[in-house]
Amino acid sequence: MKTLQKIAVPVTLGVLGLMIYNSYSAGIPKGATAVNNFDAKKYLGRWYEIARFDYKFEKNMDSVTAEYSGNPDGSIRVSNKGYDYLQKVWKESIGEAKFVKDKTIGRLKVSFFKPIWAGYNVIDIDEDYQYALVAGNSLKYLWILSRTTSLPESIRQRFIEKARKIGYNTDDLIWVKHNQ
């Protein structure tokens, strides 16, 4: 019986820890609100990364795109692709996104390395689904996306102002080049 306890207690604590970590990591920054009346079908397709912070997993990447497509189970297939201009190679990561709660709220969690999930929160989008502001689970993660490789100045200002009000340091954004 003692051997069972020696195994059961750490396993139980580990599972509980993983559950807590997963619920926290798929969070949304304080002050940010995910888009209501979100239409996942309109969101699917190709997006160009216009701006981001300097993330380790996107280091030295230009021409970054994200391609979203529906899976039969209702989840979303995520294909991120970018050109590493130092190594002169294309890199791609395939993942999966799931809605945190209601499918009409732009609050998702995404995983490229299960069982680790991260927050993916659409916090602003234009009515035609051409431009999106996406927040991660903390103020360390922010993306500005567009259906084309450019962004109108009015949308740029709108997204920058919204991000600043939430607490993002938008001066640290990297404006992605699309050469390839």
Image (cartoon, rainbow, N blue to C red):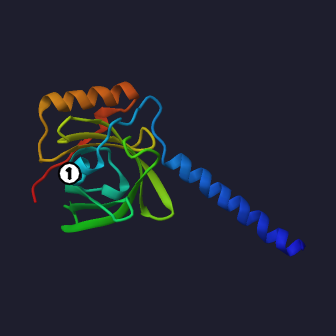
Asked if residue 93 is positioned above or below residue 52 in the image, the reply reads below
Q: Is residue 95 left or right of residue 84?
A: right
Query: On the rendered image, what quadrant is the N terminus found in?
Result: bottom right
Give x and y (percent) for residue 174: 25, 43
Answer few, some or many: residues within 10 Å of disc 1's Cα (few below 14, many 20 plus, some between 14 and 19).
Answer: many
Quadrant location of the C terminus in the rendered image: bottom left
Q: Does 172 sit left or right of 62 as displayed?
A: right
Q: Residue at x 38, y 59 (%)?
A: 75
Residue depicted at 44% across the width and 28% down the height: 31
Instruction: Compare residues 162 and 85 and report the one nearer the observer.
Output: 162
User: For residue 165, which quarter of the picture?
Assistant: top left
Percent coordinates x, y for residue 62 in the rendering:
19, 55
Q: Is residue 133 above or below residue 64?
A: above
Q: Secondary structure at mark 1?
A: strand
Would you say 177 lies left or right of 170 here?
A: left
Amino acid residing under circle 1: Trp
Residue found 25% across the figure and 48% down from its top: 43
Report the residue marked by disc 1.
47
- Percent of width and height locating residue 53: 32, 44
**Residue farthest to the right, as pictured:** 1
Identity of the residue drawn at 45% across and 43% down: 137
* Relative depth, front residue between 66 and 83: 66
